[in-house]
Amino acid sequence: MKNRKLRQSFTNAWTGVVESLKSERNLRIHAGVLSLVVAAGIALSIDTVRWAALFLAFGAVLVAELLNTAVERLVDMVTTDHCEEARQVKDMAAGAVLVAAFFAVLTGIAVFAEPLLLRVFS
């Protein structure tokens, strides 16, 4: 079921993102936080290097969440019975999201600490 046209590949990928946003609460939460962080970056006029750090952090979290969703769906397709290995696979995929989110928070602190302090004490 290989895509014959590049355009179809992009269409399918975008459909996957949209379907995930519709069905996955945690992905919507991450997208909402992303919006708040972008608003804060605009309000504080952060520089290009800080934006780059934020974009890398955003990307890591969103990619991890999309992969977690795919892993969970695949595991659910393979088995509907309680299975210790299936639980472990799902927990590991969720752990990847947790690690990405944790480091995104650290990135946010590093990015926003100086601009916030300058704003408060100026």
Image: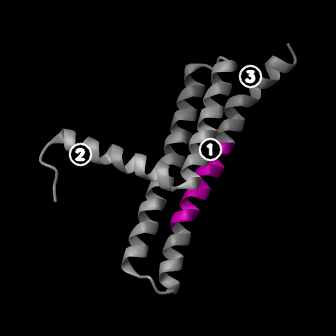
The numbered mark, 3 or 2, whose residue comes first in the sequence reads: 2
Q: Earlier in the sequence, mark 1 or mark 2?
A: 2
Q: Which of the pair 62/35 is nearer the observer?
A: 35
Cα gap from disc 1 to disc 2, whole angstroms: 29 Å
Q: Amino acid type of disc 1?
A: Ala
Q: What amino acid is labelled 2 in the image?
A: Ser
The magenta span reads 93-105
Dot 3: within a 10 Å radius of its alpha carbon, few (fewer than 14), some, or many (20 or more) residues?
Answer: some
In this rendering, which labeled residue sits more in front, label 3 or label 2? 2
Mark 3 = which residue? 115
Residue 100 falls within the magenta-colored stretch: yes
Residue 108 rendering spot, x and y as whole percentages? 67, 37
Label 3 SS? helix
Q: Which mark is residue 9?
A: 2
Q: Which of marks 3 and 1 precedes in the sequence?
A: 1
Residue type at the position of mark 3: Pro
